[in-house]
C-alpha cells in the first residue's frame, strides 16, 4: 500500500513538472543564416512554412520549411534592403531606395523603374495581385497596377514604417519617431483594400502595432506601455506597463503575445498583456552588447523573429 501511495505521489509530481514545462514552452530556437554582419531588417511569411527575410548588401532569402533552412536569392543589387513582402509563392518584393519584384519565386527580379531613388521604403503590402501600398519616408504611396506605377496619398501621414493587412479590405499602417527633441507615433487604417487611408491615432510616443483581426489590435510604445483596441482603432485602452522598452510586438490571440527588445530578449504574455516573462535572451558574447531582436511576427499560430546579428528565430 505504501509503495502504491509513493508511486501515485511520484506520478503526480512528474505530471506537475510536465505541466509547468508546458507553461514555459514558448522557447525560441536561433537559426543562423548567411546574412551579412549588418544583420536582417525585415521578414514576411504567407503561412507557417513559406517566407522571406532581407538585410544588408542585397541580402534576400526564402524558406519553405518554416525557417529551418534558407535559400539565398540573387536580386542583382548590393543595396541594403529595409522591406520585404511575400504576396504568394511566386510573387514577392523587396526594397530600400529602389524596389525589386519577382513573379517566379525569386528566379529572376525586375527593378520597378517608376520609383526614383529618393527616401527609404520601410514597408510593402499588396492587398491583391494589383493593389499595393508602400511606406516611403514615413508617407504612403499606392499602386493599382501591380507596382508598376505609384502615387502619393494622405500627405498628413508622415511617421509610418509598418503595414499589416487583416482581411481582404482592411489594413493598418503604423510607426513613429523618437529623438532627443521629439517622440511621436501614428496609426492609420484602410477599409477599401488600400485605396484610401484614415488616421485613427496620433500619439505622443513612438509605437509598434499588431492586429489579430479587423477590430482587435495592440501597440507598444517608447514609454514602455501596452495598449489594446477592440473597435478597429477607434479608441485604445492601456493594458499594462512593460518590463522594458520594446521594438516590435505580435499576438497570436487575445491571451498570448510577444514583444522583442533592444537587448536581445523576447517577452511572452499568456494573460492578454497583464504579465510578461522572458522566453528568449540572445547569447552574450564577450566584449559585445546583445544584438536587438528587430522584428517579431505571427502567422497561422507560428511566431518568427529576426535579429540584428543576422539570426532568425522561431518558436519551437
Image (cartoon, helix red, strand yellow):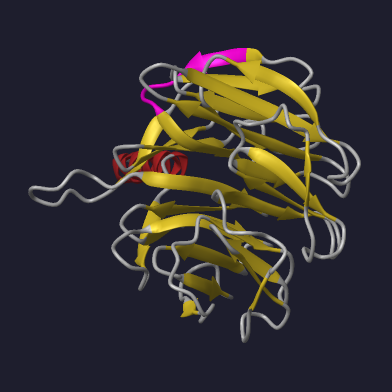
Q: In terms of image quadrants, where is residue 265?
A: top left
Looking at the image, which residue is at 73% across and 32% down?
155
Disc count in the image?
0
Quarter that holds the N terminus? top left
Residue 47 in sight from this viewpoint: no
- Image: 307 above or below 19: below
Q: Is residue 117 above or below residue 180?
A: below
Q: Can the viewer see residue 116?
A: yes
Q: Residue at x 43, y 27 (%)?
A: 276
Query: Going by the image, does 197 lie left or right of 87?
Result: right
Q: Is residue 8 left or right of residue 257?
A: left
Say if 77 sits above or below 315 in the image.
below
Taking the image as shown, residue 252 lies to the left or right of residue 147, namely left
| Residue furthest right as drawn | 192
Which image quadrant is residue 161 in? top right
Estimate the x, y position of residue 262 in percent, counting from the top left. Answer: 34, 37
Residue 242 magenta: yes
Which is nearer the eye, 59 or 288? 59
Query: Which residue shows up at 59% across the image and 75% down it?
Result: 64
- Tell me where residue 207 appears, x and y as whole percent: 54, 27
Position of residue 6 measured from the top left corner of the image (x, y, whole percent): 31, 41
Q: Nearer the viewer, residue 212 or 132?
A: 132
Specify the segment rendered in magenta: 238-245
Amino acid at each position: 500500500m505504501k509503495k502504491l501511495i509513493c508511486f501515485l505521489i511520484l506520478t503526480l509530481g512528474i505530471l506537475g513538472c510536465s505541466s509547468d514545462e508546458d507553461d514555459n514552452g514558448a522557447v525560441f530556437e536561433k537559426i543562423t543564416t548567411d546574412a551579412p554582419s549588418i544583420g536582417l531588417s525585415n521578414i514576411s511569411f504567407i503561412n507557417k512554412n513559406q517566407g522571406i527575410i532581407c538585410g544588408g548588401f542585397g541580402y534576400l532569402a526564402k524558406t519553405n520549411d518554416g525557417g529551418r533552412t534558407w535559400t539565398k536569392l540573387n536580386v542583382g543589387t548590393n543595396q541594403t534592403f529595409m522591406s520585404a513582402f511575400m504576396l504568394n509563392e511566386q510573387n514577392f518584393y523587396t526594397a530600400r531606395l529602389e524596389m525589386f519584384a519577382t513573379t517566379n519565386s525569386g528566379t529572376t527580379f525586375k527593378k520597378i523603374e517608376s520609383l526614383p531613388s529618393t527616401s527609404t521604403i520601410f514597408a510593402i503590402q499588396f492587398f491583391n495581385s494589383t493593389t499595393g501600398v508602400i511606406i516611403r519616408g514615413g508617407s504612403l504611396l499606392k499602386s493599382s497596377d501591380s507596382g508598376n506605377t505609384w502615387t502619393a496619398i494622405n500627405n498628413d501621414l508622415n511617421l509610418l514604417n509598418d503595414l499589416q493587412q487583416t482581411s481582404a479590405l482592411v489594413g493598418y499602417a503604423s510607426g513613429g519617431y523618437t529623438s532627443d527633441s521629439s517622440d511621436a507615433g501614428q496609426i492609420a487604417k484602410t477599409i477599401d483594400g488600400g485605396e484610401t487611408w484614415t488616421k485613427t491615432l496620433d500619439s505622443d510616443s513612438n509605437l509598434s502595432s499588431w492586429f489579430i483581426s479587423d477590430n482587435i489590435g495592440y501597440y507598444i510604445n517608447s514609454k514602455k506601455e501596452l495598449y489594446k483596441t477592440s473597435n478597429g482603432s477607434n479608441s485604445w485602452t492601456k493594458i499594462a506597463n512593460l518590463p522594458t522598452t520594446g521594438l516590435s510586438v505580435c499576438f497570436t490571440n487575445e491571451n498570448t503575445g510577444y514583444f522583442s527588445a533592444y537587448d536581445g530578449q523576447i517577452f511572452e504574455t499568456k494573460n492578454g498583456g497583464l504579465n510578461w516573462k522572458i522566453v528568449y535572451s540572445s547569447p552574450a558574447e564577450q566584449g559585445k552588447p546583445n544584438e536587438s531582436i528587430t522584428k517579431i511576427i505571427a502567422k497561422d499560430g507560428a511566431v518568427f523573429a529576426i535579429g540584428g546579428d543576422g539570426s532568425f528565430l522561431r518558436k519551437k
